[in-house]
């Protein structure tokens, strides 16, 4: 099975660019996420962290 996949992938022209594009997308995503974590307001982060606990304060029917 692996030989079939390997042989098929080798027959595709320019297949080496796909791993590089994937790595670039992965890298950019985590750079943006890292930037957002350090620039997000502390009040927003605190509000979001307390959001799951607010459901207990509402009366249940």
Image (cartoon, grey):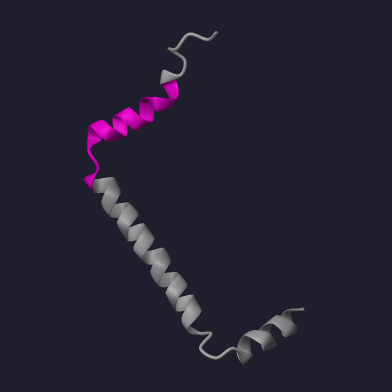
Q: Is residue 8 magenta?
A: no
**Count of number-bearing discs:** 0
Quarter residue 42 falls in: top left
Can you say whether 53 is above or below 5 in the image?
A: above
* Residue at 49 percent of width and 76 percent of height: 19
41 or 59, which is in the foreground? Answer: 59
- Residue 34, x across and y down, in percent: 31, 53
- Residue 29, x across and y down, in percent: 37, 60
61 or 16, which is in the foreground? Answer: 61
Q: In the shown orientation, is residue 36 left or right of residue 11?
A: left
* Residue at 24 percent of width and 31 percent of height: 43
Q: What quarter of the picture does the C terminus occupy? A: top right
Classified by dominant secondary structure, the portion drawn in magenta counts as helix
| Farthest residue, direction front | 61
* Residue at 29 percent of width and 46 percent of height: 37
Q: What quarter of the picture does the N terminus occupy? A: bottom right
> In the rendered structure, which segment of residues is drawn in magenta?
39-53
Can you say whether 18 is above or below 46 in the image?
A: below
């Amino acid at each position: 099975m692996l030989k079939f996949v390997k042989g098929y992938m080798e027959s595709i022209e320019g297949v080496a660019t796909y791993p590089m594009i994937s790595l670039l997308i992965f890298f950019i995503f985590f750079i943006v996420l890292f930037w957002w974590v350090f620039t997000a307001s502390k009040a927003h982060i605190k509000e979001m962290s307390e959001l799951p606990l607010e459901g207990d304060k509402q009366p249940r029917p």
